[in-house]
Image: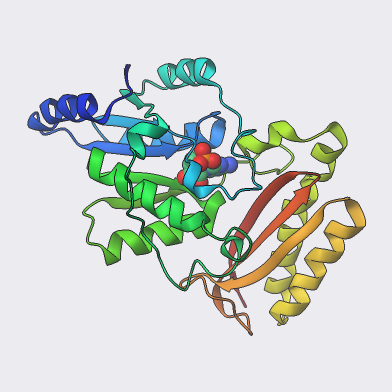
Amino acid sequence: MKIFNSTKSLQQHLKKEKAKNKSIGFVPTMGAFHKGHLSLMRKSRRENDLTIVSVFVNPTQFGPNEDFKKYPRQKKSDDLLAKKENIDIIFYPSIKEMYPSGFLTYIEVEDITKHLCGQFRKNHFKGVATVVAKFLNIVKPHTMYLGQKDIQQAFVIKRMVQDLNFSTQIKIGETIREKDGLAMSSRNAHLSKTQRKEAIYLYKSLKMAKQRAQKSTIKPKRLETLIRKIINENTKASIQYVTCIDGKTLMPIKHLHGRTIIALATYFGKTRLIDNIIFNAR
Ligand code: AMP
């Protein structure tokens, strides 16, 4: 496994690899690998000749009061895990490498960034879109792998790739969960024992809502209320949002119809957890 810190040396290496006509798979991450990251790496390994993983805790996607400083950084164990997965290249750029002094250019995807997480994390998706655009220009992968867990992020990046004519194909991997259903996340490490036990109610409530929606007709607002009730009755979490959205456009809906997503964000103490479920409504 090769490790690169500089864009220039990575690109020099990739030039040689691409000359051999290798297909390139790319998995962008913020590190602190768990099975969700590993499943994307495996998918890329299966489908490509060469897999690159980037590890970069991107400061521009964190708000001033968010957990940029506290975000887990585990380079040693990440290297070991990536090696075990037979990853070809890890790219660890520094903040200076990605945002040298004088940096002035940002990408904004409109509309679909204004609700869900975007309503509460003001410049979050601007930071995400910008850093991913930079990675796509640096790596120029044939395929990039993203997780369903961050469903709004996946939609935003898909939109950007289409709107700005990037030639990379985007593939979305399913959400990988702990045995009890909690979606794997680097932030789960910050949960207390009690919070960890309570956090299972996020997915439980989403599953119950899905079952309810598939049984008979129900309004999105009533489904959202049902989820809030389950979470409030079983946890001390504070709910930031629970929203039913159209599974094709990601926009909020007044009636359930066809492919539907329910997405939610909650705080367990200071730890922000998100989850979502996708289903076909009746
Ligand atoms: P992160 O390091 O949290 O920025 O995540 C890097 C990539 O892994 C993103 O595309 C995430 O959507 C994806 N990811 C994070 N958690 C999971 C999970 N539990 N299952 C599947 N993919 C995930």
Q: Residue at x 15, y 26 (%)?
A: 12
Residue at screen point 33% across, 45% down:
144
Of the 4 image quadrants, the one containing the N terminus is top left
Asked whether 161 or 174 is in front, the reply is 161
Residue 105 is drawn in which quadrant? Answer: bottom left
Where does the image place residue 31, in percent across and percent down from the top left? Answer: 50, 31
Residue located farthest toward the right when viewing the structure as drawn: 233
The colour scheme used to paint the residues is: rainbow
Residue drawn at the location 38% of the way across and 46% of the way down: 131
Q: Is residue 103 above or below residue 48?
A: below
Looking at the picture, tell me which residue is in the foreground, 174 or 83.
83
- Kindly give the residue lying farthest to the left in the view shown: 19
Please tell me which residue is depicted at 47% across the width and 40% down the height of the picture: 58
Residue 26 falls in image quadrant: top left
Can you give x and y, in whole percent of width and height, for residue 118 in the image? 56, 63
Q: Position of residue 218 (x, y in %)?
A: 73, 81
Q: Measuring from the top left, give residue 171's x and y in whole percent.
A: 37, 50
Res 174 visible: no
